[in-house]
Amino acid sequence: MLKSYGLRAVNWPLVLVGTITGLFFLTLARLILARHNNFFTFDYDLGIFDQAIWLLSRGGSFITVRGLDVFGHHANLGFFLLVPFYWLGAGPNFLDVLMVAGVSFGVVPIHRYSVQLLENQWHALIPPMAYLLHFATSWVINETFHPEVLAIGPLLMAYVASTRLEWRRYAAWLIAAGIWKEDIALAIVMIGIIVWIRGNRRVGLTTAASAMLYFLFATRVMIPVLSGGGAFYEGFFGPLGSGVFEVVFNALRHPSLVIDAFIAHDALGYLRDLLYPYALVPVLAPIALLIGLPQFLINMLTVHGLSANLQAHYVTMPLAAASLALAEGLRRLKRIEWRRVALGAVAATSLTTSALWGLLPYGIKYDQGNWPLGPNPRAPTMLAAISFPEPEDAVAATWNLVPHLTHRHQIFTFPNPWTIVNWGTGVETPPDPAVIDWLVIDRQVLGESTDDFERVLAEERWEIVLDHDDIVVARRAP
């Protein structure tokens, strides 16, 4: 029997944080594994990133799913850390579980910072739990692996280290965040500005300058050189131009273009929905929100509509910033009565919006087709289909089968390479379709490519080795 003093010595709020985080991890890991194993994942972007890391592990670098060099796509230098796991056989499921772990790890700095600011273990329980319950976290996981998600925890740890003047840890965590994608450098620039505002001028200036130099190197040198035609996303800003300087110049010169973009993407609604799960408390600490400002502006100014969707991975940095601002906003409520009211409001709004807008098991959207809650009746046929090509064979497959065939040097999303769609930057020479050894096709998702498929079968010599459940596998005839 435990002695009473032993029970009192237990940090029950910390135990609760750890338990809830563990349950979150296990639940979302199970769901995302079921999503992939039931053939409900995509070529964009899981297939792209999985082939990219597999290629690096085998000394290659050209992602045939995307038509770009690994680092002509994004500056995902952190992929080198994952290469040893691919030597051991890692693949899409590993990446997806790693992403869930990355989201879950964000609890650590948020909880640590909340304890530091609120000086009350029970009060400090609310911000990290609100972060996990934020509807955007479950949607980001549902979207499958994106490397910038792995930057959440390190970036938050760096910010917390800066408030404690732990500069070596601060630098190490910033590097650990910045290696995952070039856009993270812009958030690091803002952290440097915040550090500068708070009085550490040298550290802040060094941080901001270093991060901006890295961002410019990645986007103006590395990516354009390796892609052969400039960063593929430079055309996403429409009339504002391409490149950071041109976009900033045109935004200042023609503010109406910015206003039009904000209206088109409902910028105020985006901010409202981002902060509402936190009961709008982050508005009390706007300085921390600066961290998410660059990505917010990118999301609003691009003509790429998905970026303005809070259910997409582009919300990663705004969400991280809002989570820090939540803890700082609560700190600003000096009167304990006001703080308790705010904590209650955060608990209520995070739970409510999670149930209404999120994808956790108690939510209304949980069983609306976003997760595969039952077995895919065609999964056995699909599993048989992907077993035909040998690892050295070149394959063209439909988007839902591509992530299961990416551990090879040549894998294309049909109708590539016959008809070029969402491939390269327009300057690459498309490969000769004659190199394709196998077609692995799901007729149910072909859509507009159905005619292309029938034409390829009719005009070229193929041997059908499987045609069942609308799954077709064809081998090029000798």
Image (cartoon, grey):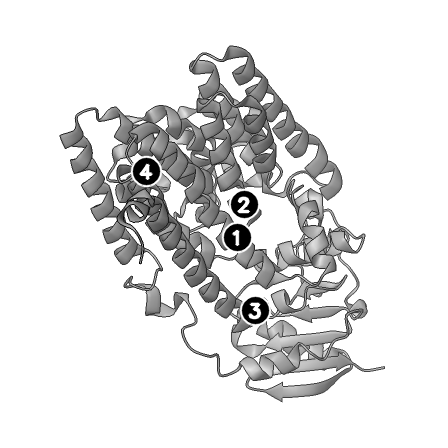
Task: Say which residue label 2 marks.
Answer: 150
Please tell me how crowded label 1 is: few (under 14), some (14-19), or many (20+) other residues with Cα within 10 Å.
many
The kind of secondary structure element at disc 3 is: loop
Q: Secondary structure at mark 1?
A: helix
Depth check, front residue: 32 or 73? 32
**Crowd class of label 4 (few under 14; some 14 to 19; many from 20; radius 10 Å):** some
Residue 477 quadrant: bottom right
Which element type, helix, strand or loop, lies under badge 4? helix
Q: Residue at x 26, y 57 (%)?
A: 356
- Label ID, residue 344: none
Relative image position of residue 470 (x, y in whole percent): 56, 83
First reached walking from the N terminus: tag 1 or tag 2: 1
Depth-wise, is mark 4 or mark 2 nearer the camera? 2
* Residue at image mark 1: 99
Asked if labels 2 and 1 touch by Cβ distance under 8 angstroms, the answer is: yes
User: Where residue 178 sits in the image (x, y, percent)?
Assistant: 59, 35
Classify mark 3: residues with Cα within 10 Å, few (<14), some (14-19) or many (20+): many
Question: Given the image, on which type of amino acid does mark 2 rest?
Answer: Leu
The Cα atoms of the two marked residues, 1 and 3, are separated by 20 Å
Q: Is residue 416 above or below residue 452?
A: above
**For the residues carrying marks 1 and 3, which lies nearer the camera in this image?**
1
Instruction: List the residue tagged with mark 4.
Output: 271
Per the model, the C-alpha gap separating discs 1 and 2 is 6 Å
User: Residue at 55% of width from left, 63% of height from top?
Assistant: 42
N-terminal-most mark, 3 or 4? 4
- Looking at the image, do the residues carrying marks 4 and 2 touch, with CB atoms under 8 Å apart? no
Ranked by sequence position, the earlier of labels 2 and 3 is 2
Residue beneath the point at 35% across and 60% down: 360
Q: How far apart, in angstroms, are the residues tagged by discs 3 and 4?
A: 33 Å
